[in-house]
Each structure stands twice: as C-alpha cells, then as structure tokens.
Amino acid sequence: MENQQDQKSEQRFAKFISTITQPPLVSIPTFAIINYFLLGFNNSILVTLICFIFGAFLPVLTSLTLIKKMKIDLDITDRSKRTLPLILAVCSYIIGFFVLYALSAPALTSALMFVYFSNTVLILLINFSWKISIHAMGVAGPTAALIYLFGIPGVIFGLIIPLVMWSRVKLGKHTPYQVLAGAVLGLVLTGVQLYYIVPWV
C-alpha cells in the first residue's frame, strides 16, 4: 500500500516538474534574468516583453490551439503530431530574433532567440526519426546561456536538468538515452552557437 502511494506521489511530482519546465516557460525567467542584468529593470521591460511574446506566448498559444484541434495530450506524446507545432515555434523564434535585432537588444538576448530558432529546427529534423527530449534540451540551452553570461554561478540553474530528465523518464515520455541526448545537445549546441553568434550580433 505504501509503495503504491509512493509511486503515485512520485508520478505527481514528476508531472509537476514536467509541467513547469516546458521549454517556452523556462525561456521567460531566462530572458528576464539576462535582460535585467544587461539593461537594468526599466530598460529591460520592453525587450523582455518581446522575448515573452515570441519566445513563450506565441509558441504556447499555437501549440495549445493545435493540441485542442487535434485532440491530443499536452505533451504531444505522438512524435508524428509534433511537426506542425515545432514549425510554428520556429517561425515565432526567427521573427522574434529579427525584432530584437532591429531594436538593438543586447547581443546575448538576440543570439539566444536565434539559438531557440536553430535548436528547434534541429529538433524538428531529429523528430522525423527519433523522439529526442525537448524538455531536457529546453532546460539545458538556457543553462548554457546563463553560464555564458555569469560563468560558474550559471551552473546553479543547471541543477534542475537531472530532475527534468528524471521526470520525463518517470512519466514514460522518454527513454534515458533520449533525455541524455537532449541535455547534451542543448548544452553543447547552445554554448557553441552563443560563442560565435554573440560577437556577430
């Protein structure tokens, strides 16, 4: 009886972690922290609002609309159903990048929005044959950005990566290899891209 209750508690906790670490939701505090640090509170409001609109609001809105229309679960467990939501997210991110660039937003902010675009394109391509963990990649990427900005202290944000990986496996949404691949690709690709893109932007 206790084992069943423990299992249910773990499932509820895993679902909670999985819900609050949806990639678009994770982008909100990430961009807010970066913009506040680089611009200060008053000067960061407009830029952060733009990041919220194109990095979170529009991707979430379009995904929820499609989920309701296609009558599928929030996690879009069926890999074949992920294509259109990912394409719409890609469009939102690239438009967001151009808007930020046009407004002379901080280089790191614009570069990170571009990374959201490029990483999502990669996810889209991988998704045609394999179900890589978008959650793991969506947490690892922002971690790389905060490490880029703050150095070692940015690693603190990355402490949630193992928890996110565990939650996705616990819920049966991914295999250990899928979450590991997402985390590694998110960290490495984001770090490399920021290293080259930030000076250019």
Image (cartoon, grey):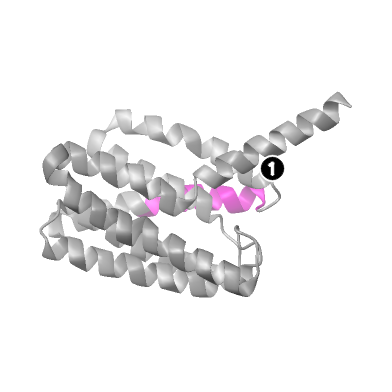
Main secondary structure along the magenta-highlighted residues: helix
Residue annotated with mark 1: 170
Residue 88 in percent (x, y) is at: 42, 72
Residue positioned most to the top: 2
| Magenta highlight on residue 159 | no
Image mark count: 1
Q: Secondary structure at mark 1?
A: helix
Residue 7 in percent (x, y) is at: 77, 34
Rendered position, 172 above or below 164:
below
Q: Amino acid at mark 1?
A: Lys
Rendered position, 75 above or below 2:
below
The 10 Å Cα crowd at callout 1, few under 14, some 14 to 19, many 20 or more, is some
| Residue drawn at 14 percent across, 59 percent down | 200
| Magenta highlight on residue 183 | yes
- Look at the image and give the residue range highlighted in magenta: 174-189
Residue 164 in percent (x, y) is at: 55, 41
- Residue 96 in view here: yes
* Viewer-side residue, 93 vs 64: 64
Residue 182 in percent (x, y) is at: 51, 52
Q: Is residue 105 left or right of residue 63?
A: left
| Residue drawn at 13 percent across, 41 percent down | 42
Determine which quarter of the picture holds residue 34. Answer: top left
| Residue drawn at 59 percent across, 40 percent down | 16
The N terminus lies in which quarter of the figure?
top right
- Residue 193 in view here: no
Q: Is residue 41 left or right of residue 28?
A: left
Determine which quarter of the picture holds residue 154. Answer: top left
Residue positioned most to the right: 1
The C terminus lies in which quarter of the figure?
bottom left
